[in-house]
Structure formats: C-alpha cells, structure tokens
Amino acid sequence: MSIVEKVESLLQALEPTVLKIADDSHYHAEHAEGKSGAHLRLRIVSEQFNGLLPLARHRLIYQAVGDFSLVGIHALAITALTPSEAA
C-alpha cells in the first residue's frame, strides 16, 4: 500500500466528500529532510468541519492520521473545507 493510499484510508474516518492527496516528495528528494518521509499536499472537504476553525480542523486530521513518523509522513500541507466553502 502506498503512502497516499494509507493516508486516504485513515482519513475515511472524517467521511470526506472530496479527498485529494498529492505526493510532492519528488520536489524534496535532494533535501536531507526529504529522505525521512513523504511530503504530501491534502485537500479535504467534510461536513465534520462545520463550525470549526482551521486549527480544530487540522487537529481532527492529525488525530485521524495518527503519528506521522509511523505512517511515513514528513510534511503535510492541508486545505480543509466544509462543503459550503468548497462550493
């Protein structure tokens, strides 16, 4: 299972209506920190984000993914929206 598939699976707990994950690790391959895990860019839309500030949305995502080092993530750029914000 690829890192993207693993993260997609973990984020299903948030019942996303949109879930797009881009693996940008190839942009960081020459950097020392690029060798310690994946660099991912996430766009997620979920009803569970309604009424939450961005920091609380990110906390939900971090909770769903768990320990980044165990999953294989070095960096995660997040865009977390409600369905009305995404429309």
Image: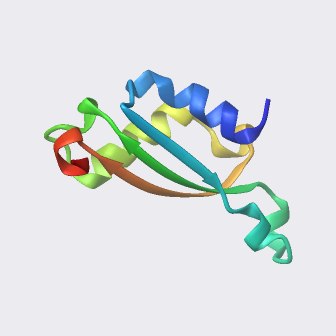
Residue displayed at 57% across by 34% down? 66
Pinpoint residue 9: horizontal percent, then vertical percent: 59, 26
Q: Is residue 46 above or below residue 69?
A: above
Q: Is residue 60 above or below residue 33?
A: above
Pinpoint residue 64: horizontal percent, then vertical percent: 49, 31
Left or right for 39, reference 47? right
Tally of numbered tags: 0
The coloring applied to the image is rainbow
Residue displayed at 16% across by 43% down? 84
Q: Which one is in front, 33 or 48?
A: 48
> Quarter of the image holding residue 44?
top left
Pinpoint residue 21: horizontal percent, then vertical percent: 57, 47
> Quarter of the image holding residue 4?
top right
Quadrant into which the N terminus falls:
top right
Left or right for 64, reference 14? right
Pinpoint residue 85: horizontal percent, then vertical percent: 20, 50
Q: Is residue 7 above or below residue 34?
A: above
Q: Is residue 65 above or below residue 38?
A: above
Residue displayed at 68% across by 33% down? 5
Residue displayed at 61% across by 53% down? 22
In the image as oriented, which residue stretches furthest toward the bottom?
Answer: 30
